[in-house]
Amino acid sequence: MTNCDSDLKSNQIISIYLDYAATTPIDKRVVEKMLPFLWSEAGYYANAASESHVLGKRVAAAIEEARNQVASLLNVDPKTLVFTSGATESINLALKGAATFYKRFGNHIITCQTEHRATLDTCAQLAREGFEISYLKTRPDGLIDLNQLITTLKPETRLVSIMLVNNETGVLQDIASLAAITRERGIIFHVDAAQAVGKIPIDLQQLPIDLMSFSAHKVYGPKGIGALYIGDNPKIRLQAQIHGGGQERGLRAGTLATHQILGMGAAFAIAKTEMLAESQRLQTYRAKLWSAISALPGVYLNGHNTHHVPGILNICFADIEKEVLLTSLADIAVSSASACAATSLEPSHVLRAMGLKSIMAHRSIRFSMGRFTTENDIDKTIAGIQKMLSIGSRSSNSSRSSDLSRSSNSVSSGLDLSDAPNALNSVGPSISSNSLSSLSSSNGFNKLNA
């Protein structure tokens, strides 16, 4: 019996799923679109590259229809999209591809300490290959200081990579202002939008972004498929990372996974029509959850209180041991770190970089809601948290005032930068949230009410 079989047959019942930031359940409408391309008498299983016969042409046309659906959600030319196996591959292609192609013009890359491991590990690899990497710090609320980016730029800077929405805290960066800074200086700007696409409107005709990565499984589509947007104004050139065929304009060799691509197209099409109403509902649920528990003792918000995506809430329970947290919430599927770092015993590098001490990072939980979350799920979660706090507060002997102290030193030790000798050691001048530029439809991004 496999571990998976054992887990499925165990007595533990997960009644509430609040881990949508890790992955979303595939929408049934997406499954229905995919099934004929796995097997059908109509021959939709054919290879899209086999354009010598009608079956191959039929599949190729279906793939282009899906490409159009993905492009429509982002308001881009379908020809600017390259299908990949997911956001991780897209990030690798964007960063490695741009860094190597433009290396003769400069070898300095800037990213942030709170990025997803797909970006951090890729940058670490590039550092081993001789590139200079600088890691921006964030303020304690998770936002990047715009002035810090400006002061970190060098004549050799060729690439900046920042995520739009943080996968652990849901913090929404002022990506329009960051993009304006890089575009003005002719620097390539890559955005990891895995947690943003399908949740908030994005208009790439308005935003000066050169490269953008995303996945289908964060938007109720299948796992194993994603895409990379490669800007054409100005035209961005990349060095291919996978070789062996001419698929995807020679940038991503390999037979196209028709059923997955069709599923991604269907998921993005659904998101375009339902995103606004869905986001408003999720924001209501998030507000209800936070309102019900924010006044309880030892409860703290990790992240900015207004600049965030709907549906993600990261909370520190300062008086509750990690083991008590996970045991008390055993019937609720939540995370204490990103899915890609869940197997590590180390505290969240995101929360550590924001200034939390290790013990407080361990006592933090991410609640992420989605399309199939109900108000009853939120009510049950609130009741479970209240019960947990009433029990935990009586048994905990920890000193909250000591554990919650933050220091500038803790930020620099929050991320293993052994592969990044040029990481920043100080935070630039801070700016208030009021001084952030307005994120409106006029600059390509519609900020939903917090």
Image (cartoon, rainbow, N blue to C red):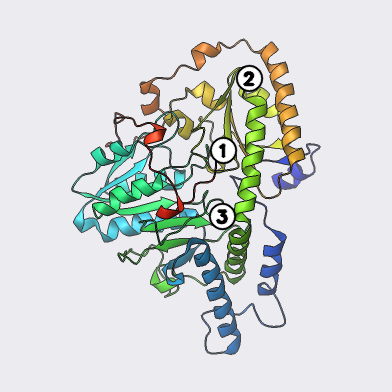
* Marker disc for residue 343: 1
Residue 410, image x and y in percent? 40, 23
Which one is in front in this view, the residue at disc 2 or the one at disc 3? 3
Question: Badge 3 is on which residue?
Answer: 198
How far apart marks 1 and 3 lie (CA) works out to 27 Å
Q: CA distance from mark 1 to mark 2?
A: 21 Å
Question: Residue at point 53% right, 75% down?
Answer: 64
Q: Residues within 10 Å of mark 1 (few under 14, many from 20)?
A: few
Tell me if mark 2 has few (under 14), some (14-19) or many (20+) residues whose alpha carbon lies within 10 angstroms of its own. many
Q: Is the Cβ of the residue at disc 2 closer than 8 Å to that at disc 3?
A: no
Q: Horizontally, is 345 left or right of 249 in the view?
A: right
In terms of sequence position, does the residue under pointer 1 or pointer 2 come before the other?
Answer: 2
Is label 2 in a helix, a strand or a loop?
loop
Q: Position of residue 394 (x, y in %)?
A: 70, 11
Quick one: 245 or 333, which is closer to the camera? 333
Tell me which corner region of the image, top left, top right, bottom left or bottom right, holds residue 127.
Answer: top left
Q: Which residue lies at the image location 58% right of the left edge and 43% below the top edge? A: 310
Q: Which residue is mark 2?
A: 320
